[in-house]
Amino acid sequence: MTLKQKLDFHYKAFDRTKISPDPLQFLHLFDDEKDIEVIGFIASVFAYGNVNQIINTLNKILVITDKQPYKFITSFYNKKKSFDLGGLKHRFYTENDISLLFNILGYVYHQYDSLKNLFQIFYNEDGQIKNSITKFSDYFINYALNRNGGTVSPGFKFMFPLPELGSACKRMNLFLRWMVRKDELDFGLWNEIPTNKLIIPVDTHVARICQSLNLTKRKNTSWAMAEEITENLKKFDSSDPVKYDFAICHIGMRKLEF
């Protein structure tokens, strides 16, 4: 088979029946678009490290939010005190980091009604995902700095990496894939952004597979690597290159042959 035939074969094979284990499975628990968007963003922020640890943390968040993430987040937008999250932590994130994230999310929903509306403000400036991610991340970091007297923890900063500093921004690109693309896996709720503007979410699994397929010549996971892989995938689907991400990632995670 040609590489395109292999990519298309795996894209079809890795359908919704193969969704677990993946943070994306939590979005499929909901029907309301507001719940899907907010749990999607939270799931993406926590999507690093061991997948079982990610699933475990997101299950705890489901319990904390009483399986009503939008109602939970928007109920606390004007609270100055920290959330009581029962000692919830996740790798680099402390309970205070997570509480701060939830407070700011509540404020964003109060001010803009959706994360899409906030992101769209930045995207409409020049139509570039890279610059939009930077401005979106800066919004959260600056809000945290203002709220916390000019300081922000390393854990909170880790939630919002910046592409101009070299980060591949895997988690933000993952969230955008879920929101912008539309198939049985992804939701297509943010249809104002074309799918050919997306950048592939690159982690160690995706990097390793794409290096073996000669989709990138770069050695280090970075924004430049993500752009290079995306441009090469456009040779196989110019309108929707990131559709191959789920299959590539899960082949890498499961240590399968491509």
Image: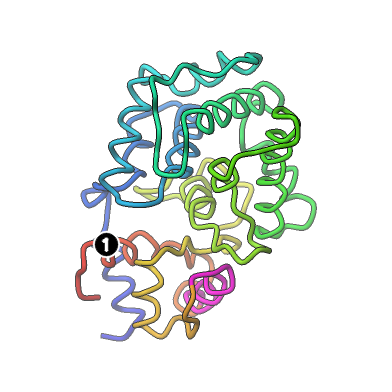
Of 91 and 105, which appears nearest the observer?
A: 91
Residue 160 horizontal side relative to residue 63, left or right: right
Whether residue 107 is situated above or below residue 232 in the rendered picture: above
Residue 216: image location, x then y, percent: 47, 81
For label 1, the residue is: 253
Residue 140: image location, x then y, percent: 67, 38
Name the amino acid type tagged 1. Answer: Met
**x 54%, y 63%: residue:** 168
Q: Residues within 10 Å of mark 1 (few under 14, many from 20)?
A: some
Span colored in magenta: 221-234
**SS class, disc 1:** helix
Residue with the most extreme right position: 125
Residue 112 horizontal side relative to residue 30, left or right: right
Residue 49: image location, x then y, percent: 36, 52
Please tell me whether residue 22 belongs to the stretch shown in magenta.
no
Residue 230: image location, x then y, percent: 52, 71
Q: Quadrant of residue 252?
A: bottom left
Residue 23 horizontal side relative to residue 125, left or right: left
Of 87 and 133, which appears nearest the observer?
A: 87
Main SS of the magenta part reads helix
**x 46%, y 16%: residue:** 84
Q: Quadrant of residue 109?
A: top right
Whether residue 213 is situated above or below residue 136 in the rendered picture: below
